[in-house]
């Protein structure tokens, strides 16, 4: 009830009108009461017994909540079954409190759409003061809900930066796991190659607990098969505050000029973060080079795979739903222009023109090049060359190369700029190195404790 009270007080009213929650589970109180009774009779069901969790609105639930990815055409869609990760949450005793707002279609609608906006949910705001402050996306509501203490935990999804970006912008911890560590089944897709769900929390400890609950091999998601020998059911054993002692961390700070001029970078805060690593006993290698970081990446994978995967999702919707293809969705949006096209739909329209066969040379070459240049000539090359345990990035500038590799990253709060804007850092590594990254993130967090709750009004 505490969290429902906070949502009622601050999310859709009050001075800020944060607008992070899209829908509340009408059964949440009954579920919480049932879990309280179950604890008395049988004991705790799992590590999240009675703990509120909110889900990004592209994650399916078999209950009274809709799953729409922020799209008006899907506002009445009720899934027939829970996503695999939702089943895992319920088995662990979690209370699914509601669905969070997100950048519409995970930023697959328009090139001018502001992060955190959806036609169904409106604009999510950053809780740290200025309403014009960048909120990050596309898991905007998931980050803001946790930052604002509307829930203990949340789930976001990422194709490229969609967990890391809002985590950094809202001073929370975000884990973008290795693709295949968490099942993709039951998530409205963007790509096959890069999509993954991941935990968002106020502390590394909470994020680690949630990650362990979410992992598991899913017979309906072949990507999870490769994780069977490399996943952990409990990541809390890696919460070691001394783990930076002797760790070799490579610092990458050679992003584009546009990034340094964007207002997302703070030299003083980043240098302070590097100093913390040194003080905690890490062996810091500054000025590392990632050969492929600045290459002209091709975007055939998300372009072609969005067309293919989203069409496959839409065609399987119940017959009473108004759209069953991208073409029908585009036409629906045009008919409901007053509600649906504040920023247009140029991204959706450009993908609608593509082939739906995934056999084009542009797509196949892009897929192979993404893997080669992000893994062999990217992260793995750099880790091996400098004998590193992890790579350390300011903000989330390493999101694209990690996303194309399908490799994990963890974003951690690292202070606030003079204008009050949150700043964060990212630890990144090779496939299934979540245990190592959690060690380093926890050690950094415990040495700094720089996160501060937003002052809501």
Image (spheres, grey):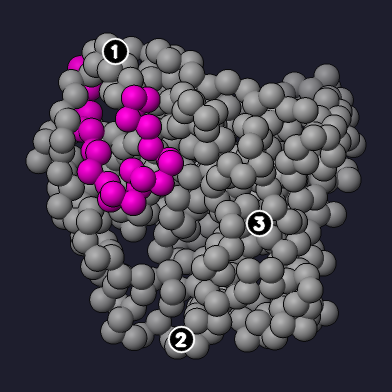
Image: 190 above or below 165: below
Who comes first in sequence, dot 2 or dot 1? 1
**Rendered-image quadrant of the C terminus:** top right
Who comes first in sequence, dot 3 or dot 1? 3
> Which residue is found at the position 63% from the left and 37% from the top?
130
Spatial distance from mark 2 to mark 3, Cα to Cα?
26 Å
Q: Is residue 49 visible?
A: no
Spatial distance from mark 2 to mark 1, Cα to Cα?
51 Å
Locate residue 448: give its quadrant: top left
Image: 275 above or below 67: above
> Which residue is found at the position 55% from the left and 51% from the top?
137
Spatial distance from mark 3 to mark 1, Cα to Cα?
40 Å
Residue 66 % position (x, y): 78, 59
User: Can residue 206 be found in the magenta stretch?
Assistant: no
Left or right of residue 176: residue 220 = right
Identify residue for label 2.
Answer: 354
- Please state which of residues 129 and 438 is positioned toward the viewer in this rendering: 129
Left or right of residue 406: residue 176 = right
- Mark 3 touching mark 1, by CB under 8 A? no
Q: Mark 1: which secondary structure? A: loop
> Which residue is found at the position 55% from the left and 65% from the top?
112
Bin the neighbour count of mark 3 within 10 Å (Cα to Cα): few under 14, some 14-19, many 20 and up.
many
Query: Viewer-nearest of labels 3 and 1?
Result: 3
Q: Mark 2: which secondary structure? A: loop
Identify residue for label 1.
Answer: 280
Task: Please give the range of residues in magenta.
Answer: 244-270
Identify residue for label 3.
Answer: 117
């Amino acid at each position: 009830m505490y969290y429902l009270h906070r949502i009622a007080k601050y999310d859709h009213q009050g001075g800020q009108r944060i607008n992070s929650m899209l829908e509340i589970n009408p059964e949440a109180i009954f579920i919480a009461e049932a879990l309280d009774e179950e604890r008395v009779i049988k004991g705790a069901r799992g590590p999240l017994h009675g703990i509120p969790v909110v889900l990004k609105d592209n994650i399916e639930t078999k209950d009274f909540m809709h799953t729409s990815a922020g799209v008006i055409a899907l506002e009445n869609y009720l899934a027939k079954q829970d996503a695999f990760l939702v089943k895992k949450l319920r088995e662990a005793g979690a209370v699914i409190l509601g669905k969070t707002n997100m950048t519409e279609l995970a930023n697959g609608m328009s090139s001018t759409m502001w992060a955190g906006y959806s036609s169904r949910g409106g604009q999510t705001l950053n809780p740290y003061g200025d309403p014009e402050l960048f909120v990050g996306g596309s898991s905007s509501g998931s980050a803001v809900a946790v930052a604002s203490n509307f829930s203990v935990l949340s789930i976001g999804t990422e194709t490229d930066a969609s967990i890391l970006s809002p985590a950094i912008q809202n001073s929370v911890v975000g884990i973008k796991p290795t693709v295949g560590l968490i099942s993709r089944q039951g998530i409205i897709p963007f790509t096959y190659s890069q999509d993954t769900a991941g935990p968002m929390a106020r502390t590394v400890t909470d994020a680690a607990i949630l990650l362990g609950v979410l992992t598991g091999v899913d017979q309906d998601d072949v990507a999870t098969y490769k994780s069977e020998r490399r996943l952990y059911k409990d990541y809390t054993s890696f919460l070691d505050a001394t783990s930076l002692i002797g760790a070799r961390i490579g610092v990458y700070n050679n992003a584009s000029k546009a990034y340094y001029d964007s207002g997302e970078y703070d030299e003083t805060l980043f240098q302070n973060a590097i100093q913390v690593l040194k003080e905690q006993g890490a062996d810091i290698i500054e000025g590392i080079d990632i050969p492929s970081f600045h290459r002209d990446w091709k975007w055939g994978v998300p372009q072609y795979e969005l067309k293919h995967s989203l069409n496959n999702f839409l065609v399987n919707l119940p017959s009473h739903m108004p759209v069953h293809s991208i073409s029908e969705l585009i036409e629906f949006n045009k008919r409901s222009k007053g509600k649906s096209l504040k920023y247009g739909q140029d991204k959706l329209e450009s993908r609608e023109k593509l082939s739906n066969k995934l056999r084009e040379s542009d797509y196949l070459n892009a897929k192979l090049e993404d893997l080669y240049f992000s893994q062999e000539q990217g992260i793995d090359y750099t880790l091996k060359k400098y004998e590193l345990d992890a790579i350390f990035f300011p903000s989330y500038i390493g999101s694209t190369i990690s996303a194309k590799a399908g490799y994990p990253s963890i974003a951690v709060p690292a202070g606030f700029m003079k204008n009050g804007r949150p700043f964060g850092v990212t630890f990144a590594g090779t496939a299934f190195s979540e245990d190592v990254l959690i060690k380093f993130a926890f050690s950094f967090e415990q040495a700094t404790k720089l996160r501060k709750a937003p002052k809501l009004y």
